[in-house]
């Protein structure tokens, strides 16, 4: 499989490449970025990862690599700043993402995996703008569920990896934690009100705490591993696995025309099925609030033309 990483010179993009080479797939990984010296540096470095037993190939590329890609991972973004919401990047990152997707040919049959934030408005806008089949425009949102699991593990005093829990909705302040689907070692667990409050504080303030460090970096390692595993699932098909991913809804959960994070299965080359889990009234309202928020945000991008984007 040919995987082109737009923004491959950045921290997340390079981490995705590293984890792809360590993964099970024999992938052709191509780094695409406007900083050729950084692309060359990463490619030179990662070549010695291959010497240590990794498989696949790694090289720098250019826009001509996009049409032949099986999967395009979009990790390019505007520089990180101290802020309280990913929405501050919407206009700038829409131009960046469009600069990639506008170079995909009509009828392109690959998968577009968007990591760039804010992921839900961008997935919604790009799918509408490009006409790519909705099951092949996916947004990476696993980190929300991972942070929820970390928060629950902390509240329960558990070692990492024992909790399964899910966040759906918007990748941001309107994410919806599904506390009624929490399990530990496969057994259902009910959190107390105090424990839920502790978890909500952890997940609700994680982003602000992190960007407040003014480190200039995002969740490089988490996203790199998560995206690489998602690429592997898309490549080989993982119908028995459930992934949270932002995908355009067409009536699922009573929502139309908006991309939100929902549980999906992944078949080779696309999202195979959107799973419609039973939700409480409060959870459904939270999902609807997220949909309204994303829809309004996308409407603000309506005047962005192709010339503006490029």
Image (tube, grey):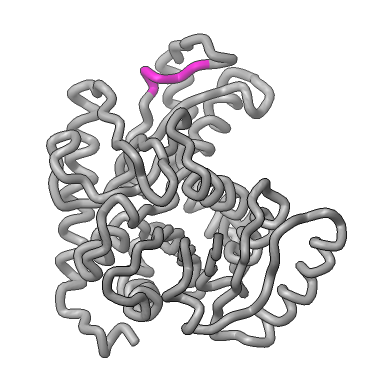
Q: Relative to residue 160, is residue 227 depicted above or below? A: below
Q: Residue 166 magenta-drawn?
A: no
In this rendering, position of residue 2 left or right of residue 48:
left
Q: Which residues are magenta?
A: 179-183
Question: In the picture, residue 103 is in which quadrant?
Answer: bottom left
Between 64 and 284, the one lying in front of the other is: 64
Between 284 and 14, the one lying in front of the other is: 14
In this rendering, position of residue 268 left or right of residue 256:
right
Q: Relative to residue 102, is residue 58 depicted above or below? A: above
Question: In the picture, residue 243 is in which quadrant?
Answer: top left
Residue shown at the point (26%, 57%) measured from the top left? 133
Question: In the picture, residue 5 is in which quadrant?
Answer: bottom right
Most extreme residue toward the bottom, as rendered? 307
Rendered location of residue 60, percent (x, y): 64, 79
Residue 95 in view: no
Q: Main secondary structure of the magenta part?
A: helix
Name the image quarter holding the C terminus: bottom left
């Amino acid at each position: 499989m040919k995987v082109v990483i737009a923004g491959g010179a950045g921290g997340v993009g390079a981490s995705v490449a590293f984890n792809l080479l360590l993964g099970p797939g024999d992938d052709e990984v191509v780094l695409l970025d406007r900083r050729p010296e950084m692309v060359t540096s990463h490619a030179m470095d990662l070549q010695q990862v291959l010497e240590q037993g990794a498989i696949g190939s790694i090289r720098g590329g250019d826009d001509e690599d996009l049409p032949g890609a099986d999967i395009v991972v979009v990790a390019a973004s505007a520089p990180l700043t101290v802020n309280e919401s990913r929405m501050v990047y919407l206009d700038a990152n829409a131009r960046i993402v469009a600069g990639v997707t506008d170079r995909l040919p009509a009828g392109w049959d690959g998968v577009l995996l968007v990591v760039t934030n804010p992921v839900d408005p961008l997935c919604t806008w790009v799918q509408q703008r490009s006409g790519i089949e909705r099951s092949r425009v996916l947004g990476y949102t696993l980190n929300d569920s991972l942070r929820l699991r970390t928060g629950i593990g902390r509240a329960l005093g558990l070692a990492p990896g024992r909790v399964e829990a899910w966040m759906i909705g918007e990748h941001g302040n309107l994410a919806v934690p599904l506390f009624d689907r929490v399990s530990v070692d496969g057994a259902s667990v009910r959190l107390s009100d105090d424990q839920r409050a502790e978890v909500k504080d952890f997940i609700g303030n994680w982003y602000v705490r992190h960007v407040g460090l003014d480190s200039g970096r995002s969740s490089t390692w988490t996203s790199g591993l998560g995206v690489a595993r998602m690429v592997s699932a898309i490549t080989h098909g993982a119908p028995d696995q459930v992934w949270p991913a932002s995908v355009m809804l067409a009536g699922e959960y009573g929502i139309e025309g908006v991309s939100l994070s929902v549980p999906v299965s992944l078949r080779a080359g696309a999202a195979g099925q959107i799973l419609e889990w039973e939700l409480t009234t409060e959870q459904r309202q939270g999902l609807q609030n997220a949909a309204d928020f994303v829809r309004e945000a996308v409407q603000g991008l309506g005047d962005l033309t192709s010339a503006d984007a490029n």
